[in-house]
Amino acid sequence: MASALKNLSQYDDSTLPSAEGLKFGIVVSEWNQEITHALYEACFDTLVKHGAKPEDIETIQVPGAFELPSGAKLLLSNFKLDAVVCIGCVIKGETKHDEYISNAVATGLMGLGVASGIPCIFGVLTPNTYEQAKERAGGKHGNKGVEGAVTAIRMAALKYEVKKPAKSVGFRTGQ
């Protein structure tokens, strides 16, 4: 298991673009609130740490993870945003309910992101136990809220970088 090897929330500050001038949305599930609010705080703090102004971060709460795509759509319909981070926690239970919820959320966010052209970041934990969730919400495996914020910053900046015609992004073709 890769997460057993290190804190996965570590990243190189020097390679992260500035979030200055960018606008973000954060949608937080109320279900498993102790976990999701720890993820939210880390996400918000990371965005601000890298230059986003608190007033440029719109936050809403939804009842559960299943409602994250609808919440993201509401934010995108009402605010001009550069990326939306969707935070939730779906813990495995005795049935396959967690699989249905996780798949629906992932599919919904991917579809919304592609259709809108605005990155919708999947910041949903899918652990087997509550203890595993805590380890990923500020415990020994870091905080996935940080990772959601870093991904949002990178994707928002990439959107603007691709629009610049004079610079190649990624790799070169035809040479």
Image (cartoon, helix red, strand yellow):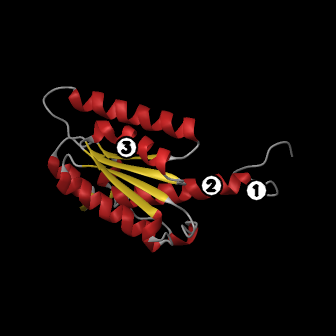
The count of marks equals 3
Pick the front one: 58 or 17: 58
Label 3 sits on a secondary structure element that is helix
* In the rendered image, the vertical position of residue 10 relative to residue 86, given as above or below: below
- Residue type, label 1: Lys
Q: Quick check: 7 left or right of 166? A: left
Q: Residue 77 or 23: which is nearer the viewer?
A: 77
User: Would residue 23 appear left or right of 165 to someone viewing this image?
Assistant: left
Mark 3–mark 1 CB contact (< 8 Å): no
Q: Secondary structure at mark 2?
A: helix
> Which of the labelled discs sits on residue 164, or is there none?
1
Tell me the distance, in whole angstroms, between the alpha carbons under discs 3 and 1: 31 Å
Residue at the disc numbered 3: 71
Q: Position of residue 82 (x, y in %)?
A: 55, 54
Say the numbered circle drawn on residue 158: 2
Disc 3 residue type (three-letter): Gly
x then y, percent, for residue 107? 42, 31
Please say if the residues under marks 2 and 3 sit with CB atoms less than 8 Å apart. no
Question: Where does residue 21 sit, x and y in percent of width and height?
Answer: 57, 68
- For marks 2 and 3, give the one nearer the viewer: 3
Q: Is residue 169 visible?
A: no
